[in-house]
Image (cartoon, grey):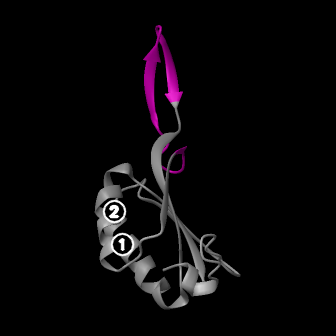
Amino acid sequence: MKKIEAIIRPSKLEELKEALLKIQVNGITITQVMGCGKQLGWKEFYRGSEVILNVLPKVKLELVVSEDNFEQTINLILEVSKTGEVGDGKIFVSTIDDAYRIRTGETGDAALN
């Protein structure tokens, strides 16, 4: 199993959720986050002083998928989230040793579905 953490533009969230549901990835945790990278942020004026805001709103999706669905899921996230502009986000992947469904006690891939 693989854990995928994708940090994307908020404007791409709904489109990505719909696309993930179409390939039957339905266990998703979504968090609103702030971050910075090459996009650098913007300048504003507050009480007459220039303030540089170097963090921007992003959305973080966390999902765990089986090895069978991993490549398809990554390719889908890349395809749907890409605008070609700075600030499209990042994807981080880690290996998950096991998963447990608390309600039933199921483990492994069975706990994901």
Which of 16/42 is in front? 16
Q: Is residue 81 above or below residue 24?
A: above
Give the farthest residue toward the bottom: 68
Give the farthest residue toward the top: 47
Q: Which residues are magenta?
A: 33-52
Q: Residue at x 51, y 31 (%)?
A: 53
Which of 28/94 is in front? 28
Q: Which residue is mark 2?
A: 84
Q: Is residue 70 above or below residue 36?
A: below
Q: Is residue 44 above or below residue 78?
A: above
Q: Amino acid at mark 2?
A: Gly
Q: CA distance from mark 1 to mark 2?
A: 21 Å
Q: Amino acid at mark 1?
A: Leu
Q: Which residue is mark 1?
A: 20
Placement of the N terminus among the 4 image quadrants: bottom right
> Quick check: is 46 in the magenta stretch?
yes
Q: Residue at x 43, y 53 (%)?
A: 87
Residue 50: percent from the left, percent from the top? 49, 18
Residue 14: percent from the left, percent from the top? 31, 57
Residue 12: percent from the left, percent from the top? 33, 57
Mark 1 is surrounded, within 10 Å at the Cα level, by few (under 14), some (14 to 19) or many (20 or more) other residues, namely some
Nearer the observer, disc 1 or disc 2? Answer: 1
Going from the N terminus, do you reach mark 1 or mark 2 first? 1
Left or right of 67, for residue 14: left
Q: Residue at x 59, y 79 (%)?
A: 2
Q: Residue at x 34, y 80 (%)?
A: 23
